[in-house]
Image (tube, rainbow, N blue to C red):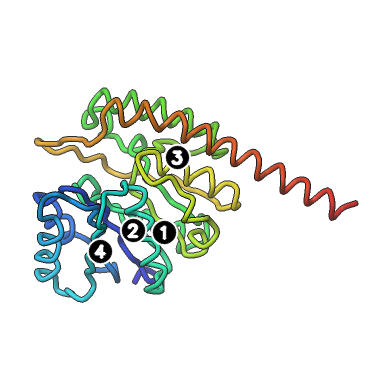
Amino acid sequence: MYRSLRVAVVIPAFNERQKIVATVETVPELVDDILVIDDASTDDTSAQAELAAQGRARPAGVEVIRHAANRGVGAAITTGYRRALALGADVAVVMAGDGQMDPADLPALLEPIATGIAGYVKGNRFLHPSIWSTMPASRIVGNVLLSAATKLTSGYHHVFDSQCGYTAISRAALEAVPLDELFPRYGYPNDLLSRLHVAGISVADVPVRPIYGEHWRSGIHLGTVVHPIPWVLLRSWGSRLAAQARKRARGAERDS
């Protein structure tokens, strides 16, 4: 619990057998439910996650859910969100299975929700002083470009580092967005931000520490980005503008 809020951590994982144990074991004790979503890994990620669950002081708080087929990181997170809602969580936090998110930053993500400042809180690695010496230059360039585009398409002009997956979302915010319609793969956070804007959910950025280990690797490559991202951004932008137009039309009808 955090300030009387039941907290669930969603851990999407694909072929993370080498890092999933440490990720699960280092989730802070304030978390009530740990949900590992194995997106049809070809290795023994699920078995390693189960092993990590046995090593925790509260093994009943860890649940491993495996997709029968690979559906994408966005779909894995959505599965975790649905399970968190079913368990009665007040807040769902996303922490990747590759250990790139500092557990010490978790309270900072939860605080704006606990105090009612925001319904969705996202990490912003560019607010942390180590960003320039830690994040690879190619990732910095890509993140800056995508963040600038997402500012326009989402309507949240104050947020940055749109690709940071370290996030926390309130139950009310989850219930306000159509989970069935969220983009299932890379590009998921960009789509979610636009839908949150349509739902009128306040969003806050908080500093989080960027982590890139010695043997860091990324599942993101040029094809992963070039193919879906422009389409996701355009779709999200169009959907947001259309939804806002419908709201204005309904408001005009009520006023007439």
Q: Could you tell me which secondary element the residue under label 1 belongs to?
A: helix
Q: CA distance from mark 3 to mark 2?
A: 24 Å
Corner quadrant of residue 129: top left
- Given the image, on which type of amino acid does mark 4 rest? Ile
Specify the quadrant that holds the N terminus: bottom left
Q: Could you tell me which secondary element the residue under label 2 belongs to?
A: helix
- Viewer-side label of 4, 2: 4
Q: Residue at x 15, y 54 (%)?
A: 20
Q: Residue at x 31, y 44 (%)?
A: 208
Q: Earlier in the sequence, mark 4 or mark 2?
A: 4
Q: CA distance from mark 3 to mark 1?
A: 23 Å
Q: Are marks 1 and 2 in contact (CB under 8 Å)?
A: yes
User: Which residue is denoted by mark 1 in the rendering?
Assistant: 111
Give the numbered dot on residue 107.
Answer: 2
- Viewer-side label of 3, 1: 3
Q: Could you tell me which secondary element the residue under label 4 belongs to?
A: strand
Q: Residues within 10 Å of mark 2 (few under 14, many from 20)?
A: few
Corner quadrant of residue 24: bottom left
Q: CA distance from mark 1 to mark 2?
A: 6 Å
Q: CA distance from mark 4 to mark 1?
A: 28 Å
Q: Name the side, left or right, on which 157 lies relative to 107.
A: right
Give the numbered dot on residue 190.
Answer: 3
